[in-house]
Image (cartoon, rainbow, N blue to C red):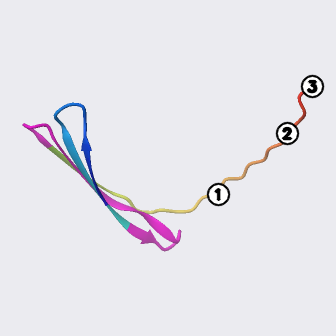
Amino acid sequence: MQATVDTLSRVKCEVDVIFQKALQLDFWVPARMNERCFDGAFLQQGEVTYDHYRKFKVDRRESLEPIP
């Protein structure tokens, strides 16, 4: 997936996200993201990788009481 972001200033950013299927979760998750931002003079680039996805469980309880 690729997106181009136009900001209010002269800065243009491009973001590429690569997804992979996490077998332990049985759905697609981000694996890597590359970002490039250019303001007309300077180019900033960054890359991030994601891994070690895992399931977690949340337990909650609710009770409703009538309003007096």
Which quarter shows the C terminus? top right
Q: Which mark is residue 64?
A: 2
Reading the chain from its start, which is encountered first: label 1 or label 3?
1
Q: Are marks 3 and 2 in contact (CB under 8 Å)?
A: no
Per the rendered image, the range of residues in magenta is 20-43
Please state which of residues 13 and 54 is positioned toward the viewer in this rendering: 13
Pair 1/3: label in front: 3
What residue is drawn where x is 65% and y is 57%? 57
Identify whether 38 is placed above or below 9.
below
Left of 33 or right of it: where is 26?
Answer: right
**Residue projecting furthest to the bottom:** 23
Q: Is residue 34 left or right of residue 21?
A: left
* Residue displayed at 60% across by 58% down: 56
23 drawn magenta: yes
Residue 1 against residue 62 in the figure, above or below: below
- Pointers 1 and 3 in contact (C-beta within 8 Å): no
Q: Which residue is mark 3?
A: 68
Magenta region, mostly helix, strand or loop? strand
Label 2, residues with CA under 10 Å away: few <14, some 14-19, many ≥20: few
Q: Residue at x 19, y 42 (%)?
A: 12
Eye-nearest disc, 2 or 1: 2
- Residue 18 placement (x, y as % from top left): 32, 63
* Few, some or many residues within 10 Å of mark 3 (<14, 14–19, 20+): few
User: Callout 3, which amino acid?
Assistant: Pro
Judge left or right: residue 58 versus residue 65: left
- Left or right of 62: which side holds 5? left
Query: Please, what secondary structure does the residue beneath circle 1 have?
Result: loop
* Mark 3 vs mark 2, CA separation in Å: 12 Å
**Label number found at residue 57:** 1
